[in-house]
Amino acid sequence: MTRRRSAAIALALLCIAPAVAAAVESATIATRDFIRPSEFTDVLLSPDGRYISALAPRPNTPYENMLAVIDTTTGKPVSSIRAGSRNEILEYRWVNDHRLVLAFATRVGSLATPSPTGELMAFDADGNHGIYLFGARGNVSADSNHMQQGGLRRDAYAKLLSSAPFGDERFLLVQTQPFTDHREGSVPSIERLDVASGESRRVLEGPAPDVSMTLDHTGEVRAAYSDGLLWTREAHGKWTLSNNPNASHVGISPIGFNHDNTRLYVEVTHPEGPDSIELMDLQSSERTLLYRGEFADPGELLPAADGSDFYGVITGDGVQAVHFFDLHGIEAQITDALAASFPGQLIRLTSFTRDGRLAIVDVSSDRNPGDYYLFDLDKSQARYLFSERRWLPTKRMRPMQPIALNARDGVQLHGFLTEPEGKGPFPMVVLPHGGPHGLFDQWMFDEETQLLASRGYAVLQINYRGSGGYGAHFENMGYRQWGLAMQDDITDATRWAIREGHADSARVCIYGGSYGGYAALEGAVREPDLYRCAIGYAGVYDLRLQLTKSDTQRTDSGLDYLHEAMGDDTADLLRRSPIAGADQIKANLLLIHGYLDERAPYAHFKALTNALDKQRKHYESLVESSEGHGFFLLDHQLAMYDKLLDFLARNIGPSSAATGDTTATSRTLPANP
């Protein structure tokens, strides 16, 4: 791209219509508007550019969504494809110019969000010729869309592969894995799936149980990965173990191949510091560094316009950005030209036509959930398509400020502080993330944070040791530190916010879900004078129960993880459990739980409330008898947030400091557990 053309792109963008409709500035944004699902996600172009597709919620059916297909030229709907009763489309891809394959999820057991079923279906862009391709309901007609019978019943799971080549009129390569009751798992395979008939043929078996495999651009299976172990193979060759972290002291996970299939993009986990993105020569095993952040792991790699390589990686050091592997590449030039029209936002080119002429541009930030544009390279124009949440006025959202501080033992911590309008110090909600290991808070639109900020609260999100996103060493530092150094990190960050004038020391509440619920209640135990109130949502309150009752312990790998992460000394686990310190709690409490929760079983709620009752401690509660690990239904979420916001207002809201009266609402008991 020439400099003249780059300037022309920027000029064309000056005429783009605003993506979000104007809102009444004085009105309080309704809670429902923050938590209702996005209107469009997962926007893709068909390979020939004739169609634009996106996932959208299905009106009045909370357990379902649909795939909308739109004519690119006219903008008119072509079809809407639904998943079937109580199912959701998890992901999808275009196989060729006119046919799509969809992967499904359903609400199973106790999880807040639908779980993948491993089933695949295929449709033409106009919604016709639907067929059930793969899964446990093979040769069974679905309840909608006039589905044809598909392949044979398979008690197995199928997964779409981002590395699988597209363009074949008939076949798609997928990874399949048999269902098993064996705790060690099962060995997956790559299969060649006929997207018209559902027939399939095994191409190759993986080298070990539960590996994820990667294909090159010819469709040859070339790499497999599991827990830091990397296997590679030449075309038609045998699997070779190329990396064992016990010997190399690094973990290597494959991402995809370069244009000539000679080198493999990999993410490398180091003994110290953040992960890196490198190119690995498959002949020599030598690696070339492409990107490594200052303190945060790299994010998603972005496929190039022709699909044969990657043009950059999303960075995680504070505010997200794109690091380009080739500053002179067409993708870098387009992004650079677009940046002038979208200052302070992350710009990603997420889908291209086969010829590279059209691209979907995703623009998002900490204040913008996401706007989608269609970029025409030949015309140097970007046309607005739609927004994920057009009803939210982005100008009224609050910035997410990256922060850094040192814990009491000198470990550097990173996180984010979101402050409401006005001048501090503010009442503050400390919001530890769940997980805890592997998950982390990052710079992006977060509806819960924005909801709290809109009600006048500062929100502190600290990535305590044990969090993902900052290298393996930082994550490993949290193992067996639940209630110890991990909790100290949250305390130190809270005191930092008070000391720096961001938070009113008399009006601080700690709230979290899952592990965050554990941290909230353990914070109230360990720091009884720091927090005015604490809210536990689907929390873990007796660590011993996780080893015996949670769904995590049902597999060998899950139980190994719990022992590694928490420990196995039951007396020590009890000492680090909120139930053991109920007598120390001074904060007012709100406990929220789903009766069907299997990840953090309802027994946690009962154990804590029994301990509180013995100490004659007041608490409020909300239990939903039909929900699991987190609330799924919008009405249940709305009831939860209404109760949460009311609780916060009475404890740390504008009028709470004057009276100190926080007991106006009586404790609510479980509906019918």
Image (cartoon, rainbow, N blue to C red):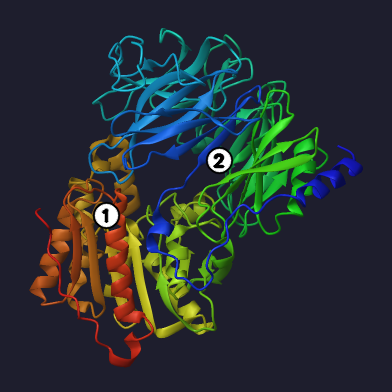
- Observer able to see residue 310: yes
- First in sequence, mark 1 or 2: give its number: 2
Tell me, yes or no, whether the two marked residues, 1 and 2, touch with CB atoms within 8 Å.
no
The x, y position of residue 252, in whole percent, is 56, 36
171 vs 534, nearest the viewer: 171
Residue at the spot of label 2 = 250
What crowding class fits label 1: few (fewer than 14 Cα within 10 Å), some (14-19), or many (20 or more)?
A: some
Secondary structure category for the residue under label 1: helix
Which residue is found at the position 36% from the left and 29% from the top?
83
* 664 w.r.t. 302: above or below: below
Q: Using the rendered view, name the quadrant where residue 166 is placed.
A: top right
Report the residue that reaches farthest toward the bottom.
658
541 vs 536, nearest the viewer: 536
Amino acid under disc 1: His
Question: What mark, if any, has residue 576 been given in the picture?
Answer: none
The x, y position of residue 667, in whole percent, is 15, 71
Which residue is found at the position 63% from the left and 31% from the top?
74
Q: CA distance from mark 1 to mark 2?
A: 44 Å
The x, y position of residue 497, in whole percent, is 49, 78
Residue at the spot of label 1 = 636
Q: Is residue 369 left or right of residue 346?
A: left
The x, y position of residue 90, in whole percent, is 42, 33
